[in-house]
Image (tube, helix red, strand yellow):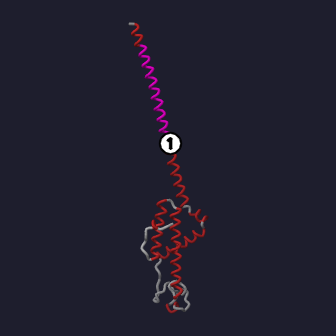
Amino acid sequence: MENQAEYVRSEMNETRENLTDKLEKLEERFSESVAAAQDSVTSTMETVKEGVEETVDSVRSALDIPAHVRAHPWLMMGGGVLVGYLAYQMLVPARRTSGGRSWSGGSSAEGNGGGGWGSWLPGSGTLGSGWQNLQRYAARTALDLVGRTARETLPGELGTSIGNTVDKMTAKLNDEPATASASRPM
């Protein structure tokens, strides 16, 4: 009987050791899985953080007007003049005289070759129609440049949206319906 008790004790000890070994191995695997999951989450968070920082830096640099002025002073000056001109044209109605010319400084008789201060402005005489065509061509060219620059330098949807808005303004200058700018070559 004593041998049987001894045998049962040894079996119990062996089973206990096997269970302890299995629990230790299970604990190691669990610890490794938790460590791998933590590394994965940390790596993903760092990647997302870097992506957000890059996007913020990209938007910040795209909207950094002083830096754009330093990099492209003439383009920015021309853009400012164009924006001012377009805003003026949209906000201030043109004054007309009985002769049909805009902005004449005196009577219509004075503007018909009489040398009034407005005789050289658009709409006056034969030079006026050429001047209007030149203004329209310059405005279309400048708007096209602004639209392309917006698409190339501003990130994603912002550049496309501003480019489309500029295309609509150009179409109004051309007296044409606005076309989808996605089909325009860059």
Query: Residue 39, how many percent across, how many down?
Result: 50, 40
The residue lying toward the viewer, choosing from 114 and 158, is 158
- Give the amino acid type for the residue marked by disc 1 in the picture: Thr
What residue do we see at 58% from left, 64% from top? 68
Q: Measuring 45% from the left and 20% from the top, which residue is drawn there?
A: 17
Residues 77 and 25: in front is 25
Is residue 31 inside the magenta stretch? yes
Compared to residue 139, the image places residue 53 above or below, namely above
As drawn, 25 above or below 10: below
In which quadrant of the rendered image does the N terminus lie?
top left
* Count of all numbered marks drawn on residues in the image: 1
Looking at this view, name the residue that lies furthest to the top: 1
Which residue sits at x=54%, y=92%?
114
Task: Reply above or below: 115 against 132.
Answer: below
Residue 13, picture quadrant: top left
Q: Is residue 36 above or below residue 120?
A: above
Q: Which residues are magenta?
A: 9-38
Query: Most prominent secondary structure in the magenta stretch?
Result: helix
Q: Residue 112 or 9: which is nearer the viewer?
A: 9
Mark 1: give few (<14), some (14-19) or many (20+) Cα within 10 Å: few
Residue situated furthest left in the rendering? 1
**Helix, strand or loop at disc 1?**
helix
Residue nearest the viewer, comparing 43 with 108: 43
Picture coordinates of residue 137 (x, y %)? 52, 77
Residue 11 at x, y percent in the picture: 41, 15
Residue, disc 1: 42
Rendering coords of residue 148 (x, y %): 52, 67
Q: Residue, x 56% and y 90% (percent of image)?
A: 115
Query: Does the magenta segment cover residue 159?
Result: no
